[in-house]
Image: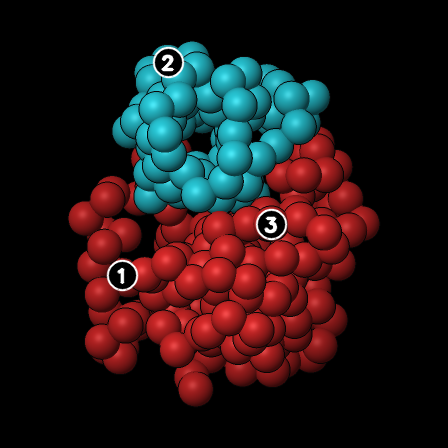
Chain colours: A red, B cyan
Amino acid sequence: MKAEEYFFMYAFPCAHIIVERRGMSEEEHEKLKKDFLEGKRLEKERLEKIFTAAFRRIKKLAERMGRDYWDFEVIKEYWDKEHNRLIDNNEDGYEKISESLKDLCRIIVAEVVKKIDNKLIVRYNGEERLVFSDLVPEAKVGDRVRIHYAYAVEKV
Amino acid sequence: MCFAIPGKVVEINGNELVVDYGVEKRRVQTFFDVKEGEYVVVSNKIVVKKVPQEDALEAIKLAKEAGFSNES
């Protein structure tokens, strides 16, 4: 998988919030999703323009790692560790957000307990959440999936 | 930074809810048991998660201060 695809898979769940704040049009959002699911090339410039906060942090991380910020290892490190670390340490604005909402921002491993069409009910830490399975259509009850906001992103 | 803005459940008809965002009300669907007055986070017109009132009010206040809302 390319760095652009890996980045987008984890950033996409946040895109709808950006739409709601009018940072991106509904049309652009739909097109991004369609392009990704159809395996079309995602332009780096396009992603950087939409996900400004994520790239600000990724650039800092890349500097610390001594690599280019579009290096696959940097993007992977960001979503695997750095993203949750910033939230857990209340850095970069997360100090203002309450725990139950920060939870939506974290990348969490959850277990699928129910499947309803393109929706999954997942459980983690005794809590339940509904996530969409568009990015992981093969997910089934009993699977463990990594979730971000309202989407299952990857099977574990 | 990206975080979701919760809304308050003001009407329930089976699994259909009306959620109040202050500036507007939206009709959404739920697969969880929710009660009137509870706060929820919604995505694509479906309830994603219930949120404690205290956390929800804090998020709504923060969103107002930052100048963004759930209008669309």
Q: For mark 2, give the secondary structure.
A: loop
Q: Is A38 situated above or below B40?
A: below
- Numbered label attached to residue A32: 1
Instruction: Tell me what residue is drawn at x 25 percent, y 43 percent.
Output: A25
Number of numbered discs:
3
- How far apart in space, not on screen, are marks 2 and 1 (Cα)? 28 Å
Of A146 and A32, nearer the camera is A146
Of A15 and B24, nearer the camera is B24
Res A63 → quadrant? bottom right
Residue A90: x %, y % from top left: 77, 44
Please give the chain letter of the residue carrying mark 2.
Answer: B
- How far apart in space, not on screen, are marks 3 and 1 (Cα)? 28 Å
Q: Is A78 situated above or below A73?
A: above
Residue type at tag 3: Glu
- Look at mark 2 in the image and give the residue it sits on: B23
Report if residue A17 is visible in the image.
no
- Look at mark 3 in the image and give the residue it sits on: A128
Mark positioned earlier in the residue sequence (3 or 1): 1
Instruction: Tell me what residue is drawn at x 23 percent, y 44 percent.
Output: A26
Residue B14: x %, y % from top left: 36, 30
Q: For mark 3, give the secondary structure.
A: strand
Q: Comparing marks 2 and 3, which lies closer to the viewer?
A: 3
Q: Comparing marks 2 and 1, which lies closer to the viewer?
A: 2
